[in-house]
């Protein structure tokens, strides 16, 4: 049951399936896919190189398409969906939750998406259109419309009988929503209360109030943070008039949490967090070259600094040999701070009230580590190059650069956030540019001044 | 209701509270804390510089201690707990879930932890000791012991009456567990089925089987991945004899998902993901200097390469000016690949079955971007330094280094994982060392060979 075994299993399956496909044993593969859960097929597709992925998709039971698409990474989903005819897609997505269906339809061109909608019955179409009318990254884009509503003036027993007639609850239902005649949310009745109350008690006596309802335009990362801190399983969504419009469930929130956290890691390296691990080469190369282009500017800025000191470099090759050490240490130290600050900003720990203290703290750490590594590297250089002067110069430059790295590591991400630029994306490179320029200037500048 | 407002609110509160504390208005602050939810107090504490944090902790209602401690980041929790007397801690943690209590107790020295346990009643102590007996990062460490069990040979109606007598369900209960006389897990009955079945139906006729039970020694990240893919709210935990020992709920899993994802981001920058944003300076400086020490070796390796070519550097300062560009571009390109591979490894997308395809793909991207940036930077250097030879040399070195970066970006993390070294921690620095050494060797080596 251990997941490690499942992962290994997935790769065993992939190896086996790849071999079976090479030998043309399509019927065998189709049968194997039929035995797998949709979410495991999704993992298999994500782990497959593109050619094999397309063959597997053809061989997959079309009834599972909807559920599989919902589990797929955005880029993989888009690639598969864009090649399907609309009537197939309409068929495949029948019976899906509205939010999941909206997720699938968003990847289609408008025309295709309208065609798929045209194949649905009127009630479903209206629900999906409603979901599509909210931006993807808001509570409206995350919510389902399949909620169970009850009135406050009935007995628990009536509710129990109503549920038995209904025959099934929507997934992840932990509360029924209490509304008045005009759909205004009055409160909710948890299943726990429903199950532990006496049958003759009125709903209004045991329900909880609606203070916690999420507004439809709340940002998805804010929704995630609320769920995380309040330990919710589901929460009602209301519009500006307190009308109940839908319900958000924890399984969709978990995806947001995972994506937000991945976003920081991938962005720091200049990667798009939607990137398919097996994306087409040309597409990936083009996306990544934008980031490399930004780094060219940073690298040229560093080279221009060195260029200012060309005469010094001409005089003494040892300086050229050593000049990469100070920028490298500054970059690493500064990026430690940047990672801490980006996490703090994402978790809401860092704001106007405490940024000054954080700055002092990181500057102090930069100073302490600056002294430590200035001594060590200064010592190494004195032993290696036999020059006290060169050792002292690299020590002074090191201390300066690690201090600057700590300060820039706090201020740059906060500044970028104020300027509405994603600190996770731009923070690392901005920091490295600063530490490269300061590190080189300090080392080469001191060398120029002091070495005659 | 938007979380942004809540975050801003937290910082407004912190500013206000800091001011109130400076003015000695302790009673006012105490009252304000009483109006806040435990999870909001936890965020406030995490966002507070340490001195203010300790005062706030003193002023917080001691009844909330348990819930707040459970919400806190590990380092912050440890710092607060280590200063509390055991009887206070025992009092504060009364009535907490066993898994949450175990989380708090794990930060105590053994002696203190035994003292706290001694203050509890026998049944609670046994439950907590059981939880503590499992490693923290396994299903056993994550689980609660508060499960509701039923027998399979009773009617739905009996179950409903039993729950009414019980009076309350544990948090995040979405299933009751069906066991036989010796506590062996037979299956589960979802609340949805319970609520929609007729009262006279027997549990055995509508329950689901126990195939999905999690084994008690499953790794926590594997548990998280199961929950994420199967959209579970809770899942039963069994020991090697299929005895039901506890239950894992989604709220604890969400913490694991968040921590795992943060781990990759923080580790890539050489940071501990438990690090308190406002940790003591000395402690942080010491932890971070280990990583800087690793980078010293990397930087010295690069300097040693340059040192091999000291004669060339002595001859032409322009080479020294340009020599940082190729390593820089290689580092950035390689780290894009490393981020992609680390995410793929964490999600289980990458394994033996497809690592070769991934290698080809990343090498191809490296080649394409290598050609692109070789041409652009070669052109810039020709215009800047007026030397076709120098331009060609940097182009050739750039192409080589980006190709190597793509290959090393795939192989290093996979190799590290095979060697049981965390690829997120060591991958980025290993990569940068390779691209620095290869980039400098290629550029300076070609320059030495071709420029006379």
Image (cartoon, coloured by chain):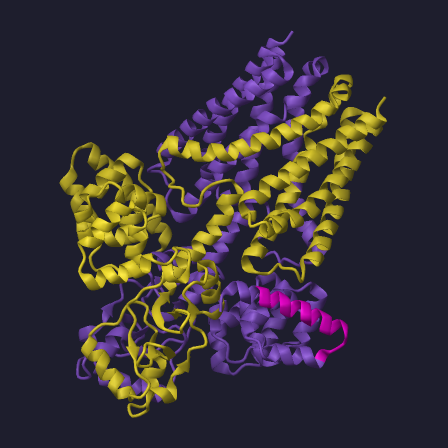
Chain colours: A purple, B yellow
Q: Residue at x 40, y 45 (%)?
A: B274
- Magenta span has A285? no
**In front of the other: B391 or B111:** B111
Above or below, comparing residue A146 to residue B332 in the picture: below
Q: Quadrant of the C terminus of chain B?
A: top right
Q: Is residue A204 left or right of residue B289?
A: left
Residue A265 makes an appearance in the image: yes
Q: Residue at x 34, y 37 (%)?
A: A354
Q: Is residue B138 left or right of residue B64?
A: right
Where residue B167 sits in the image (x, y, percent)? 20, 74
Above or below, comparing residue A137 to residue B449 in the picture: below
Extreme residue in the top direction: A452
Type of secondary structure dominating the magenta stretch = helix
Where residue B21 sits in the image (x, y, percent)? 20, 35
- Magenta span has A12? yes
**In front of the other: B11 or A267:** A267
Where residue B24 sits in the image (x, y, percent)? 16, 34
Extreme residue in the bottom direction: B200
Residue A421 makes an appearance in the image: no
The span picked out in magenta is A8-26
Q: Quadrant of the N terminus of chain B?
A: bottom left
Q: Residue at x 55, y 47 (%)?
A: B421
Q: Is residue A40 left or right of residue B37?
A: right
């Amino acid at each position: 049951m251990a997941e490690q075994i499942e992962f290994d299993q997935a790769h065993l399956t992939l190896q086996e399936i790849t071999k079976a496909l090479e030998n043309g044993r399509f019927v065998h593969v189709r049968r194997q896919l039929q035995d797998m859960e949709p979410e495991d097929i999704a993992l298999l597709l994500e782990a497959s190189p593109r050619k094999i992925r397309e063959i597997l998709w053809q061989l997959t039971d079309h009834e599972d398409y909807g559920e599989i698409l919902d589990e797929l990474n955005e880029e993989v989903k888009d690639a598969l969906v864009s090649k399907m005819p609309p009537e197939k897609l309409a068929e495949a997505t029948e019976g899906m939750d509205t939010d999941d269906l909206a997720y699938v339809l968003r990847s289609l061109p408008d025309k295709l998406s309208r065609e798929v909608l045209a194949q649905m019955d009127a009630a479903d179409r209206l629900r999906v259109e409603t979901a599509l009318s909210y931006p993807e990254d808001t509570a409206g884009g995350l919510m389902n419309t399949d909620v169970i509503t009850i009135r406050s003036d009935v007995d628990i027993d009536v509710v129990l009988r109503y549920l038995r007639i209904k025959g099934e609850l929507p997934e992840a239902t932990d509360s029924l929503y209490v509304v008045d005649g005009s759909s205004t949310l009055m409160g909710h009745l948890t299943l726990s209360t429903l199950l532990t109350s006496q049958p003759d008690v009125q709903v209004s006596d045991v329900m909880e109030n609606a203070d916690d309802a999420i507004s439809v335009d709340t940002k998805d990362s804010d929704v995630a943070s609320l769920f995380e801190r309040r330990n919710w399983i589901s929460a009602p969504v209301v519009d500006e008039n307190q009308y109940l419009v839908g319900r958000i469930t924890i399984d969709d929130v978990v995806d947001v949490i995972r994506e937000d956290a991945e976003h920081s890691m991938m962005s720091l390296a200049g990667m798009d967090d939607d990137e398919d691990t097996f994306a087409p080469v040309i597409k990936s190369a083009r996306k990544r070259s934008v980031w490399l282009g930004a780094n060219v500017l940073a690298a040229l800025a560093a080279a221009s600094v060195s260029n200012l000191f060309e005469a010094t470099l001409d005089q003494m090759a040892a300086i050229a040999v050593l000049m990469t050490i100070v920028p490298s240490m500054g970059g690493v130290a500064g990026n430690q701070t940047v990672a801490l600050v980006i996490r703090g900003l994402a978790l809401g720990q860092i704001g106007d009230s405490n940024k000054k203290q954080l700055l002092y703290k990181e500057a102090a750490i930069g100073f302490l580590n600056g002294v430590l590594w200035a001594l060590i590297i200064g010592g190494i250089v004195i032993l290696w190059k036999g020059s006290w002067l060169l050792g002292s110069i690299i020590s002074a430059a090191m201390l300066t650069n690690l201090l600057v790295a700590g300060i820039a590591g706090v201020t740059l991400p906060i500044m970028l956030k104020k300027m509405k630029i994603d600190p996770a994306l731009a923070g690392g490179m901005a920091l490295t540019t600063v530490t490269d320029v300061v590190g080189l200037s300090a080392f080469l500048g001191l060398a120029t001044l002091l070495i005659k």
